[in-house]
Image (cartoon, rainbow, N blue to C red):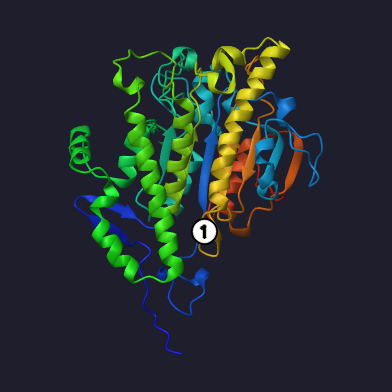
Amino acid sequence: MFITKKHLSRRTVLRGMGATVSLPLLNAMIPAATALANTAAAPKPRLGFFYFPHGAIMEKWTPTAVGRNFDMSPILEPLAPFRSQMTILSNIGNKPGESRAVHALVPATWLSCVHPKESSTPNMAATVDQLAAKYIGQDTPYPSLEVATAQGHGVGSACERGYGCSYSGTLSFSTPATPLPVESNPRQLFLRLFGQGDSPAERRFLTRQTTSLLDMISNETVALSRTLGPQDRATLNDYLESVREIERRVNNSQRGDIAALNLPEVPGATSENFDEQLNLMFDLIALAYQGNLTRIQTFMLAAEVSEQTYNHIGVPDAFHALSHHSNDEAKKARLVKIQRYHTSVFAKFIDKLGKMPDGDGSMLDHSILLYGSNMSNSNLHNQYPLPTALLGGGYGKVKGGQHLNFEQRTPLANVLLTMLQRAGVPIDKVGDSTGSVSEI
């Protein structure tokens, strides 16, 4: 049998009429008779950090049993289908993130585990997502992506006189003095990932020129498909169909009744179409992983001090106001409903990654994803113990299927250090870490 060493470059993109679309991993990118692990196409780890504000009702988050026979708590139950690739971590704390300025500091200190210096200008530390981006993200179009459902800057008590607003609206700092802005507009994120244009005016112009960026590369898509085998053609078609479906949803969301109104800004409020936006952002994140556009992503599911309401799940209360429940059981039950809803949307994203082929496994097999908060009891602004869970196989380097109950106030930094080391980042210290966690 004749075997050729020719193969499609992993960096291959489809171009046409001002549009560029990256491709998922195809068999044609792997040289013939070459082990996948010994090629440039070998699966690289994906890291994701998914943050929800206002903590959790911990008795509804924490399983009662420890070890591999743990029970699924009410808030985490939507993740039950993925328990074999899930690790729940109890007794985790983040001492450097604790202060009087709770809402103002908890987002950025979640991934730094360093207490900022009190100043009107930012002065903290680079966050772990950015440390990872320097080592495993530099050969992708976006070394990291910072996403949110709302900007969250300058919202009420999310700012604090001694620290300002630098730490409340982002999870990511590239340097001790450089907070990274988040993208909360699905359309802008879509165009950033899949379109071109250096300004809003250019992007609007390009949008008017075509109804779909996929139409702009149709000729090249057909030409590439002719060179691929049946399995690769199916993978390519599925990926591009996902792009087109999200493109349709983004365009449709812009044509809704609310989008046509000239509404004033509502402090602390996000879109009334919150459910659609949250799901859409998760779908865009999944596509960014699949297209190898990035390996590192952070996502704030809601802003600190969010006044978002959740009428679509029967909770009309404003999120932040409800988080101060005064131990009223009815209010706590409604807050649990919001927290379980966030988990259910996250679970759909996990399901998508689990079904997404990536080399010799799935995208979930090759990811390490942190899901949690830097607050515990929102009514008390308590920051211990933190709701913390890991998802994904880390290409075989994360055990999964367990509930670990550590010594009291085990540093969150130990978990973050372990994530980075399992992803191949050569680092031995994060914030106040005392070592990696072998049990993970």
Residue 176 falls in image quadrant = top left
Q: Residue at x 69, y 28 (%)?
A: 385
Work out whether residue 116 can be spotted: yes
Work out whether residue 161 can be spotted: no
Which percent across, then down, holds residue 213?
27, 47
The vertical placement of 7 against 329, above or below, is below
Q: Residue at x 45, y 78 (%)?
A: 32
Amino acid marked by disc 1: Pro
Residue 55 located left or right of residue 36: right
Which percent across, then down, holds residue 347?
59, 40
Q: Residue furthest bottom?
A: 1
The vertical placement of 12 against 419, above or below, is below
Name the residue tied to disc 1: 357
Q: Nearer the viewer, residue 59 or 179?
A: 59
Q: Nearer the viewer, residue 256 or 351?
A: 256
Q: Residue at x 25, y 55 (%)?
A: 217
User: Element type at marker 1?
Assistant: strand
